[in-house]
Image: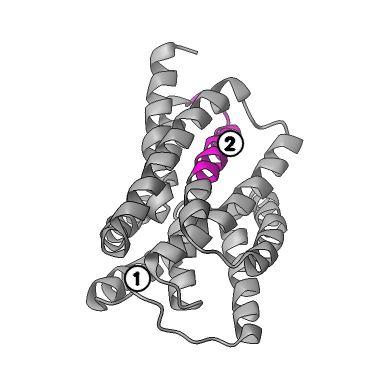
């Protein structure tokens, strides 16, 4: 592989890690760039290879959040244990079924999400829900299964959807939602990686340099998010969700 192509892939991985650490959605940068710069490789091989830097960046971001944000490890452990097989199942399903039919539905969901987040100024600014432990556990199981399946089956925007779920369903603020989302996203990425490893779809000569770049971006993004707080994360969230919306719109109407 040409060094110039690898450099561009690493640059995309850094940007993806930075954005993903704050609100998720780094796949919006990393995945298209990978598909464009590696046209001779099968799509499954490109996606499988990109899962490694995604996992690396999420790991470094998660470590930053763990140091500064209080996490409910009992609940998170349950969610991560469930998210792993859900993502594995989603990636397995992807090898048999096209995910194109999901794009129109996601377009509607994302449009609603943009309008709602913009209109509701206090969305994700502070913890407003008082949820019983039983209800919290049910919500956590549902989030882990649904978003885990989504990450394995489709992928882009998983971190953002996790952030929304933690805010809207679990009652977290943006900072705590981002921190928890990183931990669950670790499990979903790992589930997909295991499947792609078993199928021999990962090119490590590409994956490892990108992983280092994504990790640095993740470390930097998480550090900035923790310093700037909820208002900064909310703005970033809006930008990423709109970008996700535009990507799906393009895929539906012009692809």
Q: Which residue is mark 1?
A: 113
Numbered range of the magenta stretch: 39-60
Q: Which residue is mark 2?
A: 52
Quarter-of-image position of residue 150: bottom right
Q: Position of residue 155 (x, y in %)?
A: 52, 51
SS class of the residue under badge 1? Answer: helix
Q: Position of residue 68 (x, y in %)?
A: 46, 55
Q: Residue at x 62, y 24 (%)?
A: 204
Which residue is most to the top?
2
Q: How many marks?
A: 2
Q: Position of residue 89 (x, y in %)?
A: 70, 56
Type of secondary structure dominating the magenta stretch: helix
Query: Any magenta on residue 54?
Result: yes
> In the visual, does 242 lie left or right of 135?
left
Is 108 drawn above or below residue 85 in the view shown? Answer: below
Is 89 drawn above or below residue 220 in the view shown? Answer: below
Q: Nearer the viewer, residue 82 or 29?
A: 82
Q: Residues within 10 Å of mark 1 (few under 14, many from 20)?
A: some
Q: Residue at x 72, y 31 (%)?
A: 200
> In the visual, does 198 lie left or right of 190?
right
> In the visual, does 87 lie left or right of 59?
right
Q: Residue at x 56, y 28 (%)?
A: 207
Label of residue 245 in the image: none
The answer to whether residue 91 is visible is yes
SS class of the residue under badge 2? Answer: helix
Is 151 drawn above or below residue 172 in the view shown? Answer: above
Chosen colour scheme:
one colour
């Amino acid at each position: 592989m040409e060094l110039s192509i690898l450099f561009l892939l690493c640059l995309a991985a850094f940007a993806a890690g930075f954005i993903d650490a704050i609100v998720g959605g780094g796949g919006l940068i990393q995945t298209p760039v990978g598909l464009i710069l590696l046209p001779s490789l099968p799509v499954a091989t490109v996606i499988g290879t990109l899962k490694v830097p995604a996992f690396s960046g999420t790991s470094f971001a998660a470590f930053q959040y763990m140091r500064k944000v209080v996490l409910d490890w009992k609940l998170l452990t349950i969610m991560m244990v469930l998210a792993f097989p859900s993502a594995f199942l989603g990636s397995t399903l992807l090898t048999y079924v096209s995910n194109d039919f999901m794009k129109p539905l996601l377009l509607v969901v994302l449009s609603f999400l943009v309008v709602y987040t913009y209109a509701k100024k206090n969305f994700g600014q502070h913890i407003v829900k008082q949820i019983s432990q039983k209800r919290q556990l049910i919500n956590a199981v549902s989030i882990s299964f649904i978003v885990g399946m989504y990450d394995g089956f489709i992928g882009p925007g998983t971190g953002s959807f996790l952030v929304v779920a933690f805010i809207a369903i679990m009652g977290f603020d943006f900072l705590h939602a981002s921190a928890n989302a990183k931990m669950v996203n670790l499990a979903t990425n790992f589930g997909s990686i295991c499947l792609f490893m078993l199928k021999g779809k990962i090119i490590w000569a590409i994956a490892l340099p990108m992983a280092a770049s994504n990790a640095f971006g993740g470390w930097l993004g998480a550090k900035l998010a923790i310093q700037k707080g909820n208002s900064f994360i909310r703005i970033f969230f809006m930008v990423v969700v709109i970008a996700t919306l535009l990507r799906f719109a393009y895929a539906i109407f012009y692809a």
